[in-house]
Amino acid sequence: MNYTQQIRKLATKKNAVILAHNYQPPEIQDAADITGDSLELARLATEVKESTLVICGVYFMAETAKILSPDKTVLIPRPDAGCPLANQLTPEMVRAAKVAHPGSPFVVYVNSNAATKAECDVACTSANAATIAASYPEKTILFGPDANLAGWVQRQLPDKTIIPIPADGGCPTHRNFTLRDVEIARREYPNVTIIGHPECSADVQLACDLIGSTGFMIRSCGEAKEWIILTEKGIAHPLQKRYPDTVFHVMDTAVCPNMKLIELSDLYVTLRDGVYPVQVAAPIAVKARIAIERMIGAAK
Ligand code: SF4
C-alpha cells in the first residue's frame, strides 16, 4: 500500500477526518476528506461526526478547530507550520487600538492567533469580511492584521472608516504579486480573466477582473475558459480538478512555505501516533470562541 492508501485506512480505523486547505500540496488535498478555504474548513469541522480532526493547514486553523470542537482530538501534522501574517497582530496591539478608538468594534481576520482573537469582537475570513464589517452600526471599524484586506473592505463600504491594525500588516506570499505582473499577464494572455485574492496589494486588486477568497475562486472559475489566479499556487489543484477543460495560470513564485510543510509521511505519522495534539488554554478559548462563532453565524 502507498502512503495515501495507508492514510485512508488509518483515518477509518482511528475515527478521524482529514481537512486540508486549498493551498496544501496536491497529494495532501487528495488524501483529505474535506478541502476548502478557511471559512469552509472552520464550518465543516463542526459538522463532522468523527472524534478526531486532522488539520492540514497552518497552526491558527488547527487552533480554530480546537476552539470550536473542544471535546474532539485535534491534530496538526506539522505544528511548526505557522502563519507570518497571523503573528503580526498581538493581543496588546488589539487592546491599544481599542483604547485609542473607544466603542469601535475590532474585526479580526481568521488568520490570527487564538490569543489575539480572544481580544476581538468578531472574526472574519476573506469570504465574509465586508459582510461582517457592514453588520456593525458603528462608523469606525478596527481591522487586522491584513491591511490589504482592510483596504478591500473599505472599498466595499465607503460610508465606513476601516482602520487597519497594524497599518502595514500583510501576507508575504500575496505581497509578491505586483501591478507589473498583472500588466504583463494581460499582454501575454489577452483573453484571460484575472482573479485575485484580497490579500494582494490595492493596485493589484484594482487591476483584476474579480476579487475573492479561494472558495469564491473555485465557485467562479466555471464562467470563463482561461484564468490567471493571483493567490497561492496550491489553488491550481482544486481548480483543475473541478474544471478540467479550463486553462489556469498560476505564478510559480506564489508559494507559502508554511502551507507546504506537511508531507504524506507526516500525515501518516499523525494518524499512526496521534501527533501533534492542539490545545488552547481555556480562558483564551472561551473568549476566542465568541468571535469565531459570530464569524460562522454570519456565513449562514
Ligand atoms: S498564504 Fe499568507 S496568510 Fe496564508 S498561511 Fe501563508 S503566510 Fe499566512
Image (spheres, helix red, strand yellow):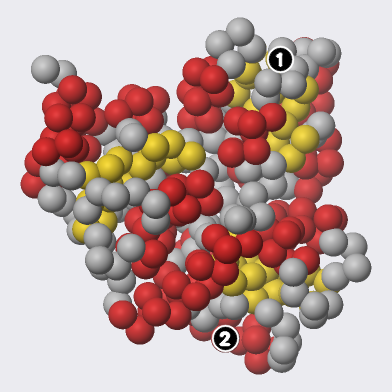
Question: Amino acid under label 2?
Answer: Arg
Left/right placement of residue 82 relative to residue 143 reads left
> Which residue is identified by label 2?
95
**In the image, residue 249 lies at what x, y percent?**
63, 19
User: Given this view, does label 1 or label 2 mark the residue nearer the observer?
Assistant: 1
**In the image, residue 28 lies at what x, y percent?**
33, 31
The residue sitting at 39% across, 56% down in the picture is 46
Which of the 4 quarters of the picture holds residue 191? top right
- Compared with residue 59, is residue 141 higher up or lower down, i.e. above or below? below
Which of the 4 quarters of the picture holds residue 225? top right
- Alpha-carbon neighbours of circle 1 within 10 Å: few (<14), some, or many (≥20)? some
Q: Is 44 in front, or is 96?
A: 44
Residue lying farthest to the right in this orientation: 159
The residue sitting at 71% across, 54% down in the picture is 148
- At mark 1, the secondary structure is strand
Q: What is the spatial separation of the Cα atoms under label 1 and label 2, in whole angstroms?
A: 45 Å
Left/right placement of residue 41 relative to residue 122 reads left
Residue lying farthest to the top in this orientation: 245
> Which residue is identified by label 1?
226
Q: Quadrant of the N terminus?
A: top left
- Compared with residue 163, is residue 49 higher up or lower down, i.e. above or below? above
